[in-house]
Image (cartoon, helix red, strand yellow):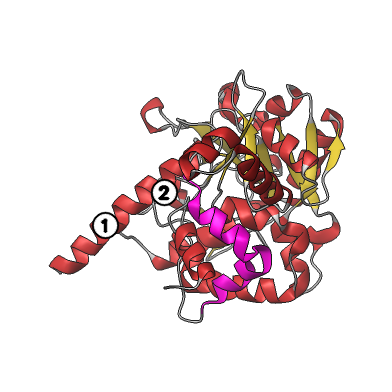
Amino acid sequence: MADIYEQLANKLDTLGKGYPRTEAGSEVNFLRKLFSEEDAAFHLKMKPGPHTAQQTAEYMGISIEEATENLDRMSSSHLIYWEYMPGSVEKFYRTVPFVHGLWELNTDKIELQDVIDRVHHFANGFGETLFDYRLPIVRVVPTSADTVQDDAILRIDDARENVKQQNLIIAADCVCRVSGKFGGACDCQESTSTCIMFGDMARFYYDEKVANTRVITVKEALAILDENERRGYVTMVGHSMTYSAICNCPPCHCAILRAAKLSVALGPKHGKQTFDRWGNYFCVYDADKCTQCGICTTRCPMSALSMAEGNVVAYERALCIGCGLCVTQCPSKALILQRKPQDELNIPEDDGYDYFDRMAVEKAQVDKERLEIERRA
């Protein structure tokens, strides 16, 4: 019988974007660090989706007291997640994928060896799998509404307006910036407390004391967004109708942006995502207005804008993720974001971790199709 942590790693490969296995097995080390054997065994018994303690007790065939004790202990250890369903005062518990999930929830436990293992895992399958399927793990939204032509930003894409509607807002440490510290100092690490959360996510982070959580005001949250725009960091949100997290992602250390660049380098593949699913906007470049100053090329996280031969700006739309960072600093107003046509918009269908459940279903189907293609080849 496989080691219980090997079983746990295999289960994580069925959640969200997966958790690919490697020959070296470095991906198991962090699980051994986080989970006791008791916690690992309980996790293996947990079904997908949200369940109350009572529901968990019933499908596991244990007492409500035992279920509650295990669920609360594992929540406090940041091994599982809880939320409140609309109209309910009971907690609903669920397992979460490795990203976004276990890795982020345990930011304050990360040590040098964990980062070394993660780099190895990223280079040997995990980085590829983040962009290996059509459903995007997150959405890129414009850094501000005024970067979009004709005030055409969608309500769900206006991060600043969403912040203004919140009652409880927290800031927490960014796992990418924290991890990056083990590789040396970087400008992005001047402040690591830049992940903004609200809703159930904020409540979980605050109650369970995740990643040095601190409560902030709307004004403070907007200041974080402003500072990160100035620095040229990409605004990403959860792929859900009522998202509860805003990431401010520096291209130097953001795992998602690095995975996106890796995806470009690896080329096409059956069932693979392209950047048309990542956001609802694309940049329009007016060559007649452009003064060839090159500022936009230093701001673009995907090198969609670059300096070509003759010091002329070149634009490759296929690489544009619609973040708007080039727009905000263009002195000649030669750049603007345009909203995609209605039939090309990528509107979320789910809320929160329900979307990750759908990712897992898609991954299983595409993996099956790829195996069949290989078999026929």
| Residue wearing tag 2 | 360
Helix, strand or loop status at disc 1: helix
Q: Is residue 179 visible?
A: yes
Provide the residue span drawn in magenta. Answer: 25-47
Q: Nearer the viewer, residue 53 or 349?
A: 53
Q: In the displayed structure, would residue 257 be above or below residue 186?
A: above
Q: Which labelled disc corresponds to residue 170?
A: none
| Residue wearing tag 1 | 368
Left or right: residue 230 versus residue 316 is right
- Give the amino acid at mark 1: Lys
Displayed quadrant of residue 102? bottom right
Residue 195 placement (x, y as % from top left): 74, 45
Q: Main secondary structure of the magenta part?
A: helix
Residue 149 placement (x, y as % from top left): 57, 28
- Rate crowding at label 1 as few (under 14), some (14 to 19) or many (20 or more) other CA atoms within 10 Å: few
Residue 320 placement (x, y as % from top left): 51, 48
